[in-house]
Amino acid sequence: MANDNQKAQGHAAYLIKNGMRIALAHSITGMSWRSLRDLWDDAHGTDMPPPGRMPCSTVAYIRAGQSQVALSTLVTVYLSLEKEYQTPTDAFISAWESTRLFTDKNAPLDINAAWYAVRDTKAGRVAWCKCKYCKAGYFFDAKETRKKSKCPFCGSMGNALNGVTLCA
Ligand SMILES: [Zn+2]
């Protein structure tokens, strides 16, 4: 078990350093709030308190300015990696690292939004589809109909392929 603990600690330190909220890091790694708080202080200094209330769904994060294109890209990468990696956390960290390289530095991706995008896609809280024109995978608010969905990559309307679901 010592190995698992070390692994969880390594994941937690990485996620917290990248700005993940303690509540989320807790649910992902299972580490105690106290240890996570210590990791936060180590990474960000005691002057910066952990963020409090923030959006808690993918759709809310997009409304708050997160890029639907970047988040959709991250989910696509995650879904392709998921089967190769031992744990969802490993797959997520890898998807986060590769997507972050391609995102606009002026509109940085929020790791909390990234986690919600993966979680909400897996849970079916957002609808996941593939664009007929450009074949990019993207998600949209599950309350919207497919006809009203607009591909964030090429801008075409209502061209999601019927019934395409990439996540198991
Ligand atoms: Zn498209």
Image (cartoon, rainbow, N blue to C red):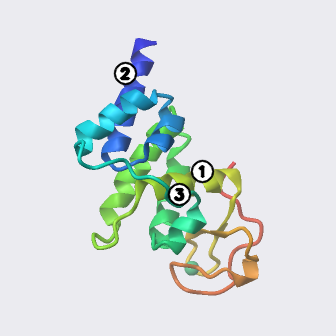
Q: Is residue 100 left or right of residue 119?
A: left
Task: Name the one closer to the observer, 166 or 25.
Answer: 25
Which residue is rendered at x = 69% and y = 51% of the image? Answer: 123
Q: Position of residue 73 (x, y in %)?
A: 48, 64
62 w.r.t. 85: above or below: below
Task: Name the one closer to the observer, 10 or 136.
Answer: 10
Q: Quadrant of ligand 1?
A: bottom right
Does label 2 or label 1 sit earlier along the sequence? 2
Separation (CA) of disc 2 from disc 1:
24 Å
Separation (CA) of disc 2 from disc 3:
27 Å
Task: Look at the numbered disc 1 and give the secondary structure of its residue.
Answer: helix
Q: Position of residue 66 (x, y in %)?
A: 45, 69
Marks 1,3: beta carbons within 8 A:
no
Residue 85 seen anywhere in this rendered image of the structure: no
Separation (CA) of disc 1 from disc 3:
9 Å
Does label 1 or label 3 sit earlier along the sequence? 3
Residue 6: mark in rendering: 2
- How many numbered markers are drawn? 3
Task: Look at the numbered disc 2 and give the secondary structure of its residue.
Answer: helix
Residue 119: mark in rendering: 1
Q: Is residue 166 left or right of residue 98?
A: right
Q: Is residue 126 left or right of residue 105?
A: right
For disc 3, the marked residue is: 75
Marks 2,3: beta carbons within 8 A:
no
Residue 64 seen anywhere in this rendered image of the structure: yes
Q: Position of residue 17 (x, y in %)?
A: 30, 44
Which residue is rendered at x = 45% and y = 52% of the image? Answer: 52
Task: Look at the numbered disc 3 and give the secondary structure of its residue.
Answer: helix
Nearest to viewer (mark 2 / mark 3): 2
